[in-house]
Amino acid sequence: MSKQKDTVTFRLDATKKAALDAIAAGMDRDRSYVLNQAIDAYLDVNRWQVEHIEQAVREADAGDFASEQEVAEAFARWRK
C-alpha cells in the first residue's frame, strides 16, 4: 500500500542542511528520509502534548482538580 507523497519546499540555513546531509550519509539514506524521520518525531511529540492539554481542559471544565492534600503530597515528593 503506497501513501501519496507531496513535495514541500522551505528555506533552511546552510549549517542545518550540511548537518542533515551528514546524518543522511552516515545512515546511508537521503536527506528526504532524515527529514521525514524528524517530522514524524516532531508530530508524535506535539500530538501527545495536544492530547494531554485537551484532556486537562476537559478535566478542568468538569471541575476535576487535585485536592490541596494531593498537591501538597506531590510537592513533598518533588522536594526530596
Image: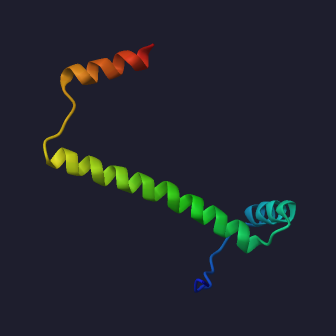
Q: Is residue 76 above or below residue 66?
A: above
Q: Residue furthest top?
A: 80
Left or right relative to 50: residue 8: right
Q: Locate the N terminus and report the quarter of the image it occupies.
A: bottom right
- Say which quarter of the image contains residue 33: bottom right
Left or right relative to 73: residue 77: right
> Residue 31, position in %: x, y?
76, 71
> Residue 38, position in %: x, y?
64, 62
How is this picture coloured? rainbow
Depth order, front residue of 3/21? 3
The residue depicted at 83 percent of the width and 62 percent of the height is 27
Q: Is residue 70 above or below residue 25?
A: above
The residue depicted at 60 percent of the width and 81 percent of the height is 8
Q: Is residue 32 above or below residue 46?
A: below
Count of numbered circles in the view: 0
The residue depicted at 79 percent of the width and 72 percent of the height is 30
Left or right relative to 76: residue 31: right
- Say which quarter of the image contains residue 70: top left
Q: Is residue 33 above or below residue 62?
A: below
Q: Locate the C terminus and report the quarter of the image it occupies.
A: top left
> Residue 79, position in %: x, y?
42, 15
- Say which quarter of the image contains residue 34: bottom right
Q: Residue furthest left?
A: 63
